[in-house]
Amino acid sequence: MKPTPLPTGIKIPAMLLLCFACIALSGFAQRPQRPSAPSGPWMNSSLSPDERADLVMKEMSVDEKIALLHGVGMPTDDAVTPENGPSNRGVGYTVGVPRLHIPGIDMSDAAYGVRSSGVNGRYSTALPANVAAAASWDTEAAYQYGALIGHELRAQGFNMSLGGGVNLTREPRNGRTFEYLGEDPVLAGTLVARLIQGTQSANVIGDIKHYALNDQESGRNSVNITISKRAARESDLLAFEIGVEQGKPAAVMCSYNRVNGDFACENEWLLNEVLKKDWKFPGFVLSDWGGTHSDVKASAAGLDNEQPGRFFYEKRFKDALDAGKIPQAELDEHVHRILRAMFAAGVIDHPRQRSVIDPFAGFETARKIEEGGIVLLRNEKAVLPLSAAKLHTIAVIGSHSDVGMISGGGSAQVDPIGGNAIKPAGEGPTHWMEEIWFPTSPLKAIQARAPHATVKYDPGTDPAAAASTAKGADVAIVFAYMWASEGMDLKSLSLPHDQDALIAAVAAANPHTIVVLETGNPVTMPWVDKPAAIMEAWFAGSDGANAVGNILFGSVNPSGKLPNTFPKSEADLPHPTITMPPPESSHFDGAATPEKWAMGLPPFQMAYDEGVKVGYKWYDAENKKPLFPFGYGLSYTTYRYSGLQVTPGDKVKVTFTLTNAGAREGSEVAEVYAALPAAAQEPPKRLIGFSKVKLKPGEKQSVTVEVDPKYLSIFDEQKNDWSLLPGDYTIMVGGSSADLPLKATVNLK
Ligand code: BGC
């Protein structure tokens, strides 16, 4: 949701001062009230969350129940009122039942860190963008990612995270691609589950979002997505299914768009049938901000909580209840789910209490995750890693790389301490739709690793001038970026601001040119074979420059693999252009009232006819060679795959040997794919598992990946269930979707 302006921010030069600031600002201001001496039979923690919820409900009046069903505005934006007063000034607040010691639900956006904390004078770590965590293919890193967010939320006084974005990269120009976990449901679902487990380990309510098929930002409030149920279940919904099953999030946020005719937040099929019945999700569904469009319909379809306000789920809800249009049992079901989620996540047994964030630990976590997520795309003649002893002159060019690195915008935005790195102190607050640069300087990181070299900086705004800076240098490192944000899609996948020309000019001037990309989305590269090396560093987080420095100079061996295909051209995409909303579907005339909101904007149609063919499945099926394939990434060592064995069983076991055949320690992501029998009529292959394995030089390890039968199944619409077809399955193993040296066929009955 559109935010309050970011603060002017105080310039705090040193980490030490920063730590003092955290102590001073986060510990003592506006301490949330702890409920006094919680009591009542529901405080017996040996009972199940369901039993505890039922016990509380016995004591609650109808008004108290309805108060749990909605927010009370956006505390970030609104004046302090008796209702939102106990909140932590985040983006959403649902009052609790103080009389019964049920705390309010205090929500903050937290995609790659706690949002808007600067408004409150608090500090948050910016992790690398979610897509960078996906590029690590590392389930432990995903857990650490979530745990850091959970602990910082809790330390700031929040008890609910609005993170866990897991929409698939069906539309690679989507402005929120950086907030999501790539194009494959097994990769994205597995990682979001670990992220949620990490977040909820800090006793905060975790959620996953935006359910479902909110795969483009353009016209997100009015677009009607049409897709077959089978294709939806095997693609976008499978990511959520895995996330719900394995991650057990306490909440799911439904999205703005319509799916097959109905808004997602009043969509019987999505909410009641699939999420609550088929997946047995026991938690609560909250609407995206302003995504509720009705009371009776939404309640019957399974929406439990309206955010951030109460157009529908307060007075109108009560009137409908009194008129018998909403049954009492439905109200009780919503309330039960919300209370159950609070007990299950531990927010009642462990009331929030502010504490001091450790920014040093946060920097380290952010740096390590970034190091594991950077993808080395090209490395001709082993130009990387750099050897400091051999370098006399280094040219560092472009993207404000003297002072900072770009971050992703929108409701995911984490505030940099001290404000935007490219603005002089005191220049004023930063704003929604403004590029925010974190004060992590690649120039300084490079100089620190090559202390005897002369490091020259060129802003890269004039390709000819940059080329002349690059010409005499031993190596030229060009930083190129493409900013992205919620609320917009990219006009194209081309680098903006003439950066293609910049890279071409620098690469022509210096044969040792290295391109470091700071993007959340795939980009096209008309210059791809000109520079000696290319790496994708994503939106790199609080300590991104040190991570990039460590990879450039080889103290860390790159191990990231692309979670999204990089196409050669947009003409190769399933939808070469984005369908934009017509003017009448773009915004309301005048203010939005509940009546207008109930109608919604006139829908425009977006047919996902490519169905299950998202990302590499599309390129495979259409025989289109991408620029860089899904799952691809280089290392400073080489790996050998051998000895594949596939054993059928409840879970198919895929065993193989992985050898580090080079001279450096490294971590390899081993990827397992399957081709289904022809009768399945599926794309040529799908990811069914993966494992990231650390190996010393020369070390050999036997790796076993156990495959959930669902990942080998098709979704049978007639049976409304997964179905494993009998027949021959080809199992393929290797280091990229386009390089799978091991193959075996197994017959499954
Ligand atoms: C976004 C959500 C976000 C919410 C609250 C919406 O506009 O789509 O991801 O959690 O706002 O800021």
Image (cartoon, rainbow, N blue to C red):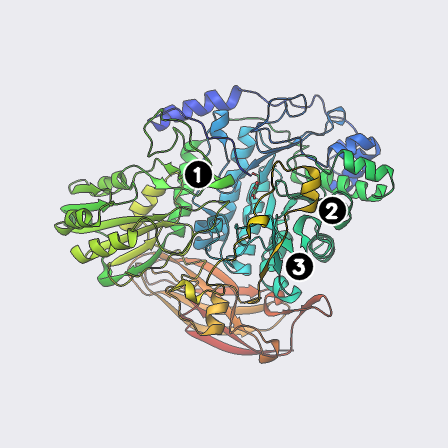
Q: Is residue 363 above or below residue 605?
A: above
Q: Is residue 408 above or below residue 355?
A: below
Looking at the rendering, the quadrant in which ligand 1 lies is top right
Secondary structure type for disc 1: loop
Amino acid on which the number 3 mark rests in the picture: Asn
* 725 relative to 76 in the view: left or right: right
Please tell me which residue is depicted at 45% across the width and 39% down the height of the picture: 433
Q: Is residue 351 above or below residue 564?
A: above
Tags 2 and 1 touching, CB below 8 Å = no
Q: Earlier in the sequence, mark 2 or mark 3?
A: 3
Q: Earlier in the sequence, mark 2 or mark 1?
A: 1
Secondary structure type for disc 3: loop
Give the camera-side residue of 123 and 709. Answer: 123
**Which of the numbered marks, if any, corresponds to residue 260?**
3
The quarter of the displayed image where residue 669 is located:
bottom left
Q: CA distance from mark 2 to mark 1?
A: 35 Å
Q: Residue 111: horizontal and vertical position, in percent? A: 51, 42
Q: Which residue is mark 2?
A: 298
At label 2, counting other C-alpha atoms closer than 10 Å, the crowd grade (few under 14, some 14-19, many 20 or more) is many
Q: Residue 446: horizontal and vertical position, in percent? A: 25, 43
At label 3, counting other C-alpha atoms closer than 10 Å, the crowd grade (few under 14, some 14-19, many 20 or more) is some
Tags 2 and 3 touching, CB below 8 Å = no
Q: Is residue 201 visible?
A: no
Respond yes or no on whether mark 3 lies under 8 Å from ligand 1. Answer: no
Give the camera-side residue of 712 and 493. Answer: 493
Amino acid on which the number 1 mark rests in the picture: Ala
**Which of the numbered marks, if any, corresponds to residue 126?**
1
